Image (cartoon, rainbow, N blue to C red):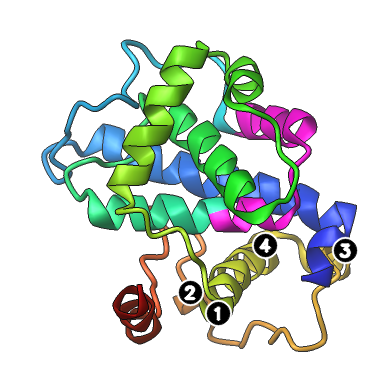
Amino acid sequence: MADLECPTVMKNIITFLSSLLQRVAESNDLNPRFHPQKISAFHGLTRPTISIQSYLERIFKYANCSPSCYVVAYVYLDRFTQQQPALSINSFNVHRLLITGVMVAAKFMDDLYYNNAYYAKVGGISTTEMNFLEVDFLFGLGFQLNVNPTTFHTYFSHLQREMLLLQPPLEHHLLNLSPSSSPPSSSSSSYKSLSTKLLHYEDDHQQHQEVAAV
């Protein structure tokens, strides 16, 4: 998608994706009784000192993967939480889920990508742990890595609307949205710009077709 090639758009994608994940993690931290917590391989003993945004910016700086990988990683994280409802995103696991999601997206989307040892260094974990997280993530996804164009556009549009609603009006032009993108309506206040959930969208009909074709 051409929009993602714009540095300003990618900067905003990173900012608002990290903001969304921050809200989801904080919500689950504060309300554990509503989100039964499962201890997993992604769960750290302590909260990382680096913020989610700084961590995602670090991944973006060093991973050198295609811009589409970050939207696909967002799809994977949402898909993962749907497949694993007892594993809520929180401050103890979000960083490991992020580095794993981006790495898996890069391997699936890009012709050239760094190996697990490199991503481990970027993410601040050992290669052994990175290998284990990758396997756990793939099984958690049920190896459903394909993201069809409809799903990709839906998640990307969700981030675009999030950016439009949270940016000052005079800065909207900086987002360089495509002509096909719809501007927010006057009823945009009904949109959950401060959502504490991921999108939870899938093109179920096409997803079932893809599974049946395997």
What kind of residue is marked 2? Tyr
Count residues near mark 2 (Cα–Cα under 10 Å), then give few for <14, some for 14-19, many for 20+. Answer: some
Instruction: State the SS at label 2.
Output: loop
Residue 32 in picture, x, y percent from top left: 18, 36
First-in-chain label (4 vs 3) = 4
| Residue stretch in magenta | 53-72
Q: Which residue is mark 4?
A: 163
User: Which of pointers 1 and 3 lies earlier in the amino acid sequence?
Assistant: 3
Mark 1 in CB contact with mark 3 (< 8 angstroms): no
Q: Are marks 2 and 4 in contact (CB under 8 Å)?
A: no
Pick the quarter of the image with the N terminus. Answer: bottom right
Residue type at mark 4 is: Met
Decide which of 38, 133 is in the foreground and name it: 133
Identify the residue position indicated by label 3 in the image.
Answer: 174
**Res 191 label:** 2
CB contact under 8 Å: marks 4 and 3: no
Q: How far apart in space, not on screen, are marks 2 and 3 (Cα)?
A: 21 Å
Q: Is residue 58 magenta?
A: yes
Q: Earlier in the sequence, mark 2 or mark 4?
A: 4
Circle 4 or circle 1, nearest the eye = 4
